[in-house]
Image: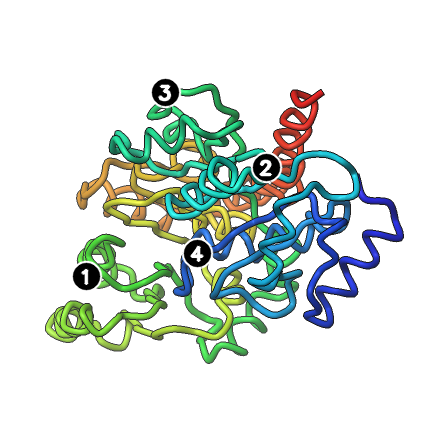
């Protein structure tokens, strides 16, 4: 573990975007994808906390300058051990990153230990299985993803920043700040607008639910890419045809999603497929109960009947029924909101994920003797 002086050095390097001192770097977190993704977001959230007690650096595109980032010319530094004498850990989260680690270790004889985090919930292809077998340790982000692994592994579930996602001091004030009417209740669905995310299921559920509930409004946030622009427009047209254009609000991509969670009274995650899925956690940490489909890790995040409900994928009648119960019962909704907040804070703080990953690192180092 880095001493306090070394930790301070890493913080300073991150703050000034200086090239890190590779003699102190014991973990490398590569990011081989420029476009923002769940993996990229995970690295952005974890590395600042990990760097408080560990020499860690990132490498690759699509990462903010505030992180401790290796320069490409520093790759040659990986051919020798850090000052601690331990093998550096190369922590991959995608196939290209696993392959890069294997090449560095097997071809260039870099003294590395390879760790892979798997979030996939499907039978891996032969190439992926081959790469996974080359790893020194494997982390699964959920029990579901672990079920598809044929090698020893450790489950470390994702966490969230519970200081950032927290109920607003005054919901009415928070709603006004977003241009919402504080006299109304809001049900949200956040994320990219596309078929996989089930945005159409949410809209259809709202078309059935809202007419009989005049004090409720639905909110959709998230970007629709060019190839999904027509899909989004059709949803807007459906809302207009149902006479609900002013009660099914499409807010597009917002700069900061955090306050939107706190402004909701109910959150729905209608995905058809998901690798893990953080939005139910972010909603619960904001004191909002959740109705979610049984995809990703949702069934492992939500306490059924306590913090919300999990329904079958694409089961629109169930979505309508479960959401309707929450919308109609203020007391039940409040009880679930309090339970959701307590559950998220107790079981899914980002620090717990950091500690779980560090435990895997320590096991790898201990195995080296």
Q: Which residue is mark 4?
A: 32
Camera-side residue: 303 or 327? 303
Label 2 element class: strand
Label 3 element class: loop
Of all residues, the one furthest to the right in this rendering is 5
Instruction: Please state if 29 lies on the left or on the right of 216 as rendered.
Output: right
Q: Which residue is mark 3?
A: 150
- Callouts 2 and 3 close, C-beta under 8 Å: no
Camera-side residue: 197 or 15? 15
Quarter placement of the N terminus = top right
- Callouts 2 and 1 close, C-beta under 8 Å: no
- CA distance for labels 4 and 3: 25 Å
* Disc 2 versus disc 1: nearer the observer: 2
Q: Is residue 219 above or below residue 97?
A: below
Q: Which residue is mark 2?
A: 112
Q: Which residue is mark 1?
A: 207
* Disc 2 versus disc 3: nearer the observer: 2
**Can you tell which mark lies on residue 239?**
none
Q: How many marks?
A: 4
Q: Is residue 347 above or below residue 73?
A: above
């Amino acid at each position: 573990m880095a001493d306090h002086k070394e930790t301070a050095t890493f913080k300073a390097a991150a703050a000034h975007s200086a090239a890190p001192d590779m003699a102190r770097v014991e973990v490398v977190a590569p990011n081989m994808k420029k476009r923002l993704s769940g993996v990229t977001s995970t690295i952005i959230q974890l590395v600042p906390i990990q760097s408080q007690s560990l020499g860690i650096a990132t490498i690759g595109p699509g990462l903010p300058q505030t992180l401790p980032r290796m320069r490409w010319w520093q790759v040659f530094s990986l051919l020798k051990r850090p000052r601690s004498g331990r093998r550096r850990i190369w922590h991959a989260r995608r196939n290209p990153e696993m392959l890069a680690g294997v090449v560095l270790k097997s071809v260039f004889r870099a003294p590395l230990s390879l760790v892979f985090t798997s979030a996939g919930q499907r039978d891996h292809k032969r190439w992926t299985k081959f790469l996974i077998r080359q790893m020194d340790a494997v982390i699964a982000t959920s029990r579901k993803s672990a079920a598809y692994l044929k090698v020893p592994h450790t489950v470390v579930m994702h966490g969230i920043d519970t200081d950032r996602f927290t109920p607003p001091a005054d919901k009415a004030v928070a709603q006004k700040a977003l241009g919402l009417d504080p006299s109304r209740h809001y049900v949200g669905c956040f994320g990219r607008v596309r078929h996989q995310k089930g945005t159409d299921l949410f809209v259809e559920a709202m078309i059935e639910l809202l007419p009989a509930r005049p004090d409720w409004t639905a909110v959709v946030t998230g970007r629709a890419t060019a190839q999904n622009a027509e899909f989004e427009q059709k949803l807007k047209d459906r809302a207009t045809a149902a006479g609900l254009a002013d009660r099914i609000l499409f807010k597009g991509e917002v700069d900061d999603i955090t306050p939107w969670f706190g402004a909701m009274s109910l959150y729905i995650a209608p995905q058809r497929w998901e690798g893990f899925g953080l939005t139910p956690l972010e909603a619960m940490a904001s004191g909002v109960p959740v109705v979610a489909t049984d995809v990703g890790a949702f069934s492992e995040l939500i306490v059924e009947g306590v913090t919300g409900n999990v329904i079958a994928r694409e089961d629109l009648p169930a979505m309508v029924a479960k959401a309707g119960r929450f919308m109609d019962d203020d007391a039940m909704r409040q009880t679930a909101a309090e339970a959701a907040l307590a559950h998220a804070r107790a079981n899914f703080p980002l620090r717990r994920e950091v500690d779980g990953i560090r435990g895997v690192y320590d096991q790898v180092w201990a195995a080296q003797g």
